[in-house]
């Protein structure tokens, strides 16, 4: 059985409502108009907007950034000197802002 590739930085317009996409090429599909843009490139652009935007980090942003960078929980935690369970905890609190100290560490 073929394994599905994990979703890289899944998001929609409600997830990061402070990021506004402009001039994205569109194409027609059976479902109507859809973005005609490489998903990986789009995810990287959204990640760049997150880190350059002075918006407090929440669990949603932490998970999205980790996924875009292609890091496991352990690989994300080790350079920060924290545990994978700390990252998992942050990610689980989707809408909760990280403390300023944790935000700086991340």
Image (cartoon, grey):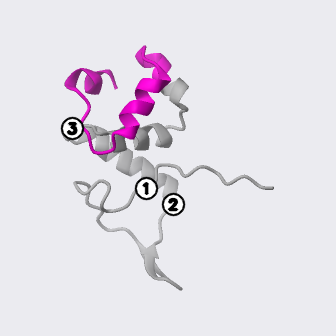
Write down the residue under mark 3: 56
Q: Which mark is residue 38?
A: 2
Whether residue 52 is in magenta: the answer is no
Report, in whole angstroms, how far the alpha carbon at label 2 lies from the one at label 1.
6 Å
Q: Which mark is residue 62?
A: none
Residue 23, horizontal then vertical, whole percent: 32, 68
Question: Image quarter for residue 103?
Answer: top left
Residue drawn at x 53%, y 86% as measured from the top left: 30
Residue drawn at x 22%, y 54% as measured from the top left: 18
Question: Image quarter for residue 50?
Answer: top left
Residue drawn at x 46%, y 19% as measured from the top left: 83
Magenta stretch?
77-106
Q: Earlier in the sequence, mark 3 or mark 1?
A: 1
Report, in whole angstroms, how far the alpha carbon at label 3 lies from the one at label 1.
21 Å
Whether residue 101 is in magenta: the answer is yes
Report whether 82 appears left or right of 101. right
Image quadrant containing the N terminus: bottom right
Residue 98, horizontal then vertical, whole percent: 26, 31
Q: Nearer the viewer, mark 2 or mark 3?
A: 3
Write down the residue under mark 1: 42
Mark 2 near mark 1, Cβ–Cβ under 8 Å?
A: yes
Which residue in the rendered view is the most extreme toward the right?
Answer: 1
Residue drawn at x 42%, y 29% as measured from the top left: 87
Mark 2 near mark 3, Cβ–Cβ under 8 Å?
A: no
Of helix, strand and loop, which one carries label 2?
A: loop
């Amino acid at each position: 059985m073929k394994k599905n590739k994990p979703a890289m930085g899944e998001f929609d317009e409600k997830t990061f409502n402070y990021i506004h996409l402009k001039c994205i090429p569109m194409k027609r599909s059976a479902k109507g108009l859809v973005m005609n843009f490489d998903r990986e490139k789009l995810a990287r652009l959204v990640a760049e907007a997150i880190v350059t935007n002075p918006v407090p980090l929440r669990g949603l942003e932490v998970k999205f950034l980790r996924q875009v960078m292609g890091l496991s929980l352990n690989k994300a935690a080790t350079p920060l000197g924290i545990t994978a369970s700390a990252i998992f905890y942050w990610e689980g609190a989707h809408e909760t802002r990280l403390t300023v100290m944790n935000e700086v560490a991340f």
